[in-house]
Amino acid sequence: MKSDRKIKILRFARSLAYARDDKKMDLMDKIISLAKRRGFIYPGSEIYGGLSGFWDYGPLGIELKKNIKRQWWKNMVYDRPDVVGIDAAIIMNPAVWRSSGHLDAFTDPLIECKICHQRIRADYVDLKKEHEKIHQGKKIDWTEPKSFNLLTEVLLGTTEPKLKAYLRGEITQGVFVNFQNVVNSTRIKIPFGIAQIGKAFRNEITPGNFSFRSREFEQMELEYFVKPNEKEAEKLFEFWKKKRMMWYVKLGIKAQHLRLRDHKADERAHYARFATDIEYNSPFGWKEFEGIHHRGDWDLGRHKLTYKDSQTNEEYTPFVLETSGGVDRAALFFLIDAYHEENDRVILKLNPILAPFKAAVFPLLANKKELVDIAREIYQSLSKNYYVAWDSRGNIGKRYYSQDEIGTPFCLTVDYDTLSDNTVTVRFRDTTKQERVKKENLIEFFTKQLHQTSI
Ligand code: ATP
């Protein structure tokens, strides 16, 4: 068990990870508070004091994540005849990780403070400086950096010694080990892609910045296989960089908050020939959103897999271009980018396609049966196609504000005019403008509105 003193130091160091810029820290605190208060993201196993690097998604968080994943899958799989999807197991034969090089090279540099034994990532210069402040007056002695493997071990089986396996550190290997299966069981031909969304686990040395760096997270990845022609591969690498960047912009991230950053040779992962990060200008600095990698023939080569062209009989080891984004980072950055304050109102200006609720339905008064009945009918009919909120409590202004704060793009109010002209008030989140729409045209209205924002 850690001593109280160590725990305090640990907490202090974590809190300092946010404390670069007071104004921005304020924003991060607001996001964390909103996420918990309204049911987006909770600390994992909170009632037992939490567990560093683990987060739970609440009723709205799960919707946001599902919507992100749905849009990704639509854009990367359904819109592309050259891409198919798979869903591989999280735990694989440990030989996979030996072949892929992860057992040797999936590491981060770790240093330990010789005074309090706090361990941090050696390349986190800011955190190192902040830690040095904790021991004011004393000269800090850090151990030499040592390579710390990020794979999370699990023990399987009933007899001793149990089989040591690993929770996957990246979802990618599940695609490579199924490369032959996919080629044999589909009509797909090179160039083609295999897409996957799923959980990955890393025993991160320093989890932090809310859910940004977690130990359990979800990735959404495309592995795109091409002939081993360097020029063609580089062209496609450029194509995927632009395409992935545009995806975030079209879904609402402000273009000026994104940039591409090429990795220098000494920071590339062991498998990468080239690597470029899409970075987001977060309250804690420019941070990786998604990695685009040219993995060459590293992985298929290591797994001794080749491709045979059925027409030319040519056999070769394809090159792989990878786009690898994090679902949790996307959820966090979409929340941060959408957060707005206007006068006394907080608005999450999420793209409606990502918003947890597409609409909220209100009867003007909860105790007027005629109004409640019509509102219920509308709620039920919209719910067949969309996730819709219901609220009949308190004053209408408060109900609007409550929906603005969670990003609901449209609020529908059934009022006394509804009884006479069969219309409802539709109120738009971002402008607060109101429009009366015929009850029977509501589905068409929403389909049109959402179509405009879809990508
Ligand atoms: P970082 O440099 O931030 O550690 P990485 O380069 O190790 O990230 P990749 O291996 O390229 O990340 O993983 C692809 C994507 O998976 C990242 O761009 C990120 O969105 C997501 N991801 C990676 N590690 C984490 C983590 N610990 N917590 C949340 N998401 C992560």
Image (tube, helix red, strand yellow):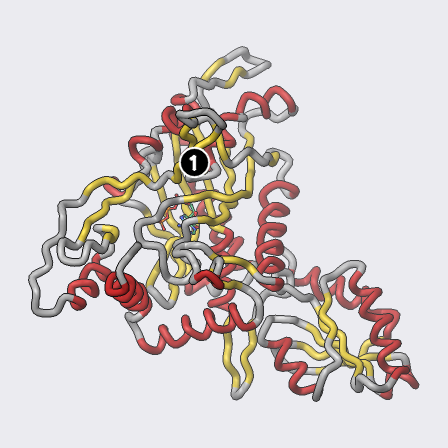
Along the line of sight, the residue nearer the viewer: 350 or 399: 399
Give the side of residue 14 with respect to residue 343, left or right: left
Which three-letter amino acid code belongs to the residue tagged 1?
Answer: Val
Residue occupying the point 38% across, 63% down: 281
Give the crowd class for mark 1: few <14, some 14-19, many >=20 residues within 10 Å. few
Along the line of sight, the residue nearer the viewer: 86 or 227: 86
Residue 260 horizontal/vertical position (percent): 38, 52
Quarter containing the C terminus: bottom right
**Does the image show residue 228?**
no
Residue 267 horizontal/vertical position (percent): 27, 43
Along the line of sight, the residue nearer the viewer: 203 or 287: 203
Give the side of residue 150 with respect to residue 124, left or right: right
Along the line of sight, the residue nearer the viewer: 427 or 2: 2
Residue 232 horizontal/vertical position (percent): 44, 31
The answer to whether 12 is drawn above or below residue 211 in the figure is below
- Report the residue marked by disc 1: 154
Residue occupying the point 36% across, 45% down: 203
Under circle 1, the secondary element is strand
Residue occupying the point 43% across, 21% down: 303
Residue 282 horizontal/vertical position (percent): 39, 64
Residue occupying the point 41% across, 24% down: 95
Give the side of residue 223 with respect to residue 302, left or right: right
Residue most toward the right? 420
The answer to whether 393 is drawn above or below residue 321 in the figure is below
